Structure formats: structure tokens, C-alpha cells
Amino acid sequence: MRSECEQCDFTFLLPSDMRKVAGSIDDSLPEAALVVENLGITLKVRDLRTVLPETDLCGEVINFYFRMLVHRGRSLCVRPRSYAFDAHFYPMLTEYNYEDVYKTWGGMVDIFKYDILHFPNA
């Protein structure tokens, strides 16, 4: 079931919807075929197949889902405001020192403007 808001122009896919879409993809489609391009993210067949049971989600699917949450938070009908870091942020933070990560990610966003911060761990 999709979650829709009457005041928003965007339909939000629930995880169960994403699994249904992935399960209905024709096996004859190439893995690199474009399935979704929205919110600055491109999902291909190979990406969507990672939402199926017994697979690990790829970073792009995680990024897409969190961007949907952020987009919903920016709409007039839903609060609180949220910000989602890229799925690669947390692994970089645990692998490298703080200064190196700050050079790449720091200063890009004022985190104190948001009510909720999402740190996906791909």
C-alpha cells in the first residue's frame, strides 16, 4: 500500500511496495536497465533486486528510501523536518578519521535545522 498525502505531489513507496516491484521485474531485462529516476537517484534493475528477501540492500536503494523520507519532511503536510546522510557516510566515518570525513561531508548541511537525522548503515 502506498502512503499518499492529499497536499503533496509525491507518492511514497513503502518497503513492501518496493519488494513487490522488485519481484515483478521481468527476468529478461538487463541488470543495468533503468527502473526509477527520481529525487536525484537512479535505480536500476540490479539495485531493485536487492530489496528481495535473502539479499543485502545496496546503498542506492537505501539512499532513495531516505530521500523519500526527507522529501516528505519538506512537504507542508508532514512534520518533523528530517535530513538523511548518504548510505556511504557512516561506513566512511567508521573507517577514516574524523578530519578526513569532515573534509568530504562537513559543512554541507546545518544539522541543527532538522528534527531528525538519519544515518543509514549500508
Image (cartoon, grey):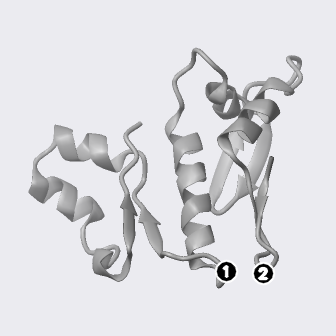
Q: Residue at x 37, y 40 (%)?
A: 121
Q: Nearer the viewer, residue 44 or 19?
A: 19
Q: Quick one: label 2, few (<14), some, or many (20+) residues within 10 Å? A: few
Question: Where does residue 59 sit, x and y in percent of width and height?
Answer: 49, 39
In the picture, the quarter occupied by the C terminus is top left
Left/right placement of residue 43 relative to residue 70 reads: right
Left/right placement of residue 29 relative to residue 81 reads: right
Q: Nearer the viewer, residue 120 or 87?
A: 120
Q: Amino acid at mark 1?
A: Cys
Mark 2 touches mark 1? (CB < 8 Å): yes
Q: Residue at x 28, y 40 (%)?
A: 91
Query: Which numbered disc covers residue 77?
Result: 1
Residue to which mark 2 is pinned:
7
Of pointers 2 and 1, the one earlier in the residue sequence: 2
Q: Residue at x 57, y 19 (%)?
A: 55
With respect to residue 74, does 39 lie above or below?
Answer: above
SS for dot 2: loop
With respect to residue 52, does 65 lie above or below?
Answer: below
Left/right placement of residue 70 relative to residue 113 reads: right
With respect to residue 39, does 13 lie above or below?
Answer: above
Disc 2/disc 1 C-alpha distance (Å): 6 Å
